[in-house]
Amino acid sequence: MKGGPCKDEFIAWENCVEAAESNKENIVDACFEVTGLLRKCMEAHIDYYEPILRAEKAMEEEATREASEKNKNPSLGISQSPQKLLAHSKASRLVIGPLLSLLPLLPDNNRSAHLVPPCPASQKVLTLSFILALDCLSSGHQLIL
């Protein structure tokens, strides 16, 4: 990510997240503006960041679907409002930032590889995905987003 066209926006986002964590602030609230700027930059350079943007969209759709299912069928668990699930999804997306830094390591043909929709959006799933992605790359395997 730091080697891509949105380097400055990513560094600003990364600094904001670090500052919010060290000040024990809500990262979503504290970094709302810089996250928006990073997203706009990524959308402006869709050819480079398309796999990440598709992953983010899939996470939002999954959170909306989960909210709809839980509201229709309370037996699926504790029902949460769609707003709460989407807020959780937005907070979880902050974990995807480190994944963005992996993008320049991928061969060009993998940047547009088929995207498998992620499991339900949760920070644990994304953190695990990040760890597995690092392990995959360090082993010399291809990473398919």
Image: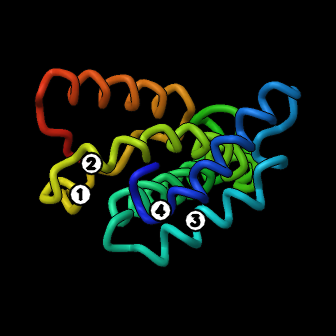
Between the C-alphas of marks 4 and 1, the distance is 16 Å
Could you say which is closer to the camera, residue 136 or residue 69?
136
Q: Which residue is mark 3?
A: 39
Residue type highlighted by circle 2: Leu
Residue at image coords 49%, 38% = 98
Residue type highlighted by circle 1: Arg
Could you say which is closer to the camera, residue 90 or residue 2?
2
Residue 48 at what x, y percent from top left?
Answer: 33, 66
Give SS at disc 1: helix
Mark 1: give few (<14), some (14-19) or many (20+) Cα within 10 Å: many
The label shown at residue 57 is 4
Between the C-alphas of marks 1 and 2, the distance is 7 Å
Residue type highlighted by circle 3: Arg
Mark 2: give few (<14), some (14-19) or many (20+) Cα within 10 Å: some
Q: In the picture provided, is 9 more to the left or to the right than 45? A: right
Q: In the picture provided, is 135 more to the left or to the right than 98? A: left
Q: Which residue is mark 1?
A: 111
Between the C-alphas of marks 3 and 1, the distance is 17 Å
Residue at image coords 19%, 57% = 114
Which one is closest to the eye, mark 3 or mark 2?
3
